[in-house]
Amino acid sequence: MSQYHRGRKKEWDARTILEGWGYRTTRTAGSRGLWDVHAIKEGQHHLLIQVKYTKKRGSWRDANCVLFEEFEPPLATYKEFWIYTLGIAEPEIISLA
């Protein structure tokens, strides 16, 4: 399986988790934006999530991560990195508040 397909699978995994928590989600296809998943919790807030998949901890940052960190979201919108590491089922979630 290619790196793209592994990453896409993790994006779908993130959506499944979020939907279980009561969010509505969409995925940015083709890794063309600053975030991979947009999640909305009705009447509460939005989440913009950059999903990363890595074989070893600490090796997930890239240029898009920097742009994502610098992006100023609108009110009631939060940014998070969801880091999936090979061999670990649950993602590490890093809030950028």
Image (spheres, grey):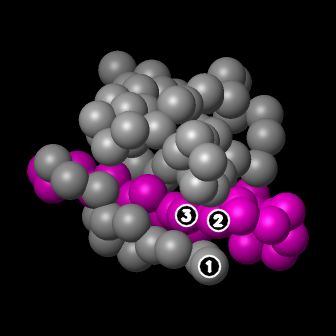
Q: Quadrant of the C terminus?
A: bottom right
Q: What residue is shown at x 38% (from left), y 38% (from top)?
A: 22
Q: What residue is shown at x 68% (from left), y 47% (from top)?
A: 35
Q: Residue furthest front?
A: 43
- Mark 1–mark 2 Cα distance, whole angstroms, equals 6 Å
Q: Report the disc number at residue 39.
A: none
Mark closer to the chain start, 1 or 2: 2
Q: Quadrant of the N terminus?
A: top left
- Image position, residue 3 (x, y; %): 46, 33
Count of labels in the image: 3
Residue 81 is at least partly visible in this image: yes
Marks 2 and 3 in Cβ contact (< 8 Å): yes
Q: What residue is shown at x 59% (from left), y 55% (from top)?
A: 44
Q: In this picture, is 24 found above or below 40? A: above
Could you tell me which secondary element the residue under label 2 belongs to? strand
* Residue on which the image places disc 1: 97
Using the rendered view, name the quadrant where residue 79 is placed: bottom right
Between residues 24 and 17, which one lies in front from this camera angle?
24
Marks 1 and 2 in Cβ contact (< 8 Å): yes
Could you tell me which secondary element the residue under label 3 belongs to? strand
The kind of residue tagged 2 is: Tyr
Mark closer to the chain start, 3 or 1: 3
The kind of residue tagged 3 is: Glu
* Residue on which the image places disc 3: 80
- Label 2 vs label 3, nearer the camera: 2
* Residue on which the image places disc 2: 78
Q: In this picture, is 85 found above or below 14? A: below
Q: Is residue 5 magenta?
A: no
- Image position, residue 75 (x, y; %): 80, 67
- Mark 3–mark 1 Cα distance, whole angstroms, equals 8 Å
Which region of the structure is painted magenta?
Answer: 59-88
- Image position, residue 29 (x, y; %): 67, 22
